[in-house]
Amino acid sequence: MALKEKEAIIFHPIGHIRSPFKIPEGMPIQPSGAKDVKGHIELYEALEEGLQDLEGFSHIILLYQFHKNEGFELKVKPFMDTEKRGLFSTRAPRRPNMIGMSTVELLGIEGNILKIKGVDVLDNTPLIDIKPYVVKFDAVPADRFGWLEANAEKSETLKSDERFAQNK
């Protein structure tokens, strides 16, 4: 079954993520590779009231749109491997719905601005949602990591390149 335009669910940004990364090439591929990278979120002012009580959390989960990508392939060569893998077994940014997720450290909130650390996204990325990170909910014990078992440590040093930056 192919995705059809009228089946699409439309999400509207709630703000934008600001980062030092102006182009995809050379930026971290996961938050673990961006531990000390600071940025901020510019939440739309009309939504500021929704930030109440968020400052009590050390980390937050960001859901965002891969706004610079087009199209996708069901088999991709991920950054952390040399062979093609099924898209849904990767975190490749070119996906049917172009939704990304990062867990970042929340440093503080000033009005509608959230100061964050561990930013691994392009500057001005549209933010779809914010959720508090809770270890008891989100850090689920796992005993299998598929093809990533031998490669996960690479996320701390590998940088993005052109392979997912544009439609090929």
Image: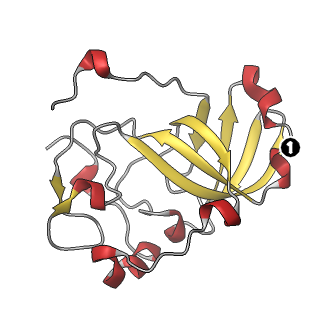
Spot occupied by residue 48 in the image (x, y as percentages of width and height): 78, 28
Q: Quadrant of residue 9?
A: top left
Left/right placement of residue 118 relative to residue 162 reads right
Residue located at (68% from left, 66% from top) = 135
Residue located at (58% from left, 41% from top) = 17
**Whether residue 21 is visible:** no
Q: Is residue 161 above or below residue 130?
A: below
Residue located at (27% from left, 75% from top) = 147
- Which residue bears the numbered disc 1? 53
Q: How is the image coloured?
A: secondary structure
As helix, strand or loop, the secondary structure at mark 1 comes to loop
Spot occupied by residue 33 in the image (x, y as percentages of width and height): 50, 70
Foreground residue, 81 or 53?
53
Spot occupied by residue 107 in the image (x, y as percentages of width and height): 78, 56
Q: Residue furthest bottom?
A: 150
Look at label 1 and name its amino acid: Asp
Q: Quadrant of residue 26?
A: bottom left
Q: Is residue 117 above or below residue 53?
A: below
Dot 1, how many residues are within 10 Å of its Cα: few (below 14), some (14-19), or many (20+)? few
Foreground residue, 3 or 23?
3
User: Which image quadrant: the N terminus?
Assistant: top left
